[in-house]
Image (cartoon, helix red, strand yellow):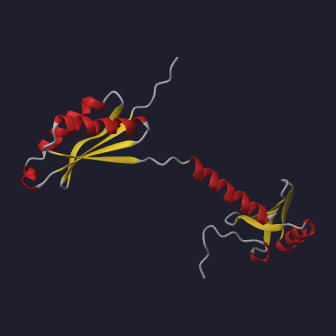
Amino acid sequence: MSKKKDQVLLNEQIDAPEVRCVGDDGTQYGIVSRDEALKIAEQKGLDLVLIAPNANPPVCKIMDYGKFKYQQEKKLKEAKKKQTKIEVKEIKLSVKIAQNDIDYKVKHAREFLEKGKHVKFRVFLRGREMAHPEAGVEVLEKIIPLIEDIGVVEKKPHLEGRYVNMLVIPKKEEKKK
C-alpha cells in the first residue's frame, strides 16, 4: 500500500509510539506518547496532525485539520493568481513578401509588443526555397530595424524544419526619474 506524498496523517493514523507534540497556539507539550497527544487533542476538540514524519521523534501539531486544509488550498490559489502567463503571437511570412506587406505585419507585431506579448516571426520555406534558407533569414533581418525601438530580439533568426523563426519580446520599460 503506497502513500501519497501530500497525504497528511492525523489522529489514529499516526503509528509512532512517541511524538513531539506542539499546540495550535505554539504551546510545547514535549515528547509524549501518541495516546496522550490524542487525549490532549480530543480535549481541545482538535485533530492531531503529523507535521514532520521524518523527525526523531515525529512532530505532531494539535490543530483544526479542516481549517489547515482550507488555508493550504487558499495559499495555492493565491500563488496561482500571481503567476503570469506569457502569450506568444505568431506572424507568418514568406520569402517572396513585398515590403508593404512586411510593414503591415510589423504594424501588427508592434501592437502585440505594446500589449506586452511576445511575437514569433515565421518564414515558411516552400519547395526549392529550402535550398536557400538564408533568404528567410534576410526577410527576418529586414524586420529587426523596424521593431528594435519597441522590442528586443530574444532568438535570432534560425532554421527549424521548414521554418526560419525569430522571437521578439517587448522591451522592459525604464523607470522615469
Residue 40, by quadrant, is: bottom right
**Residue lying at the far bottom of the rendered structure:** 1
Q: Residue 3's x, y, as percent?
A: 62, 75
Q: Residue 65's x, y, as percent?
A: 77, 65
Q: Is 53 on the left or on the right of 34, as rendered?
A: left
Residue 25, by quadrant, is: bottom right
Is residue 37 among what the camera can see? yes
Question: Split into 4 quadrants, where in the image is the N terminus?
Answer: bottom right
Q: Residue 151's x, y, as percent?
A: 35, 33
Residue 150, by quadrant, is: top left
Q: Is 141 on the left or on the right of 73, as rendered?
A: left
Nearest to the observer: residue 89 or residue 9: 89
Above or below, 158 relative to 110: below
Residue at (54% x, 48% y) in the render: 83
Above or below, 120 relative to 24: above
Q: Residue 22's x, y, as percent?
A: 82, 59
Nearest to the observer: residue 99 or residue 58: 99
Residue at (86% x, 74% y) in the render: 35
Nearest to the observer: residue 40 or residue 119: 119
Is residue 57 among what the camera can see? no
User: Tag count in the figure?
Assistant: 0
Nearest to the observer: residue 81 or residue 36: 81
Q: Is 57 on the left or on the right of 115, as rendered?
A: right
Q: Is 59 on the left or on the right of 129, as rendered?
A: right
Residue at (16% x, 42% y) in the render: 97
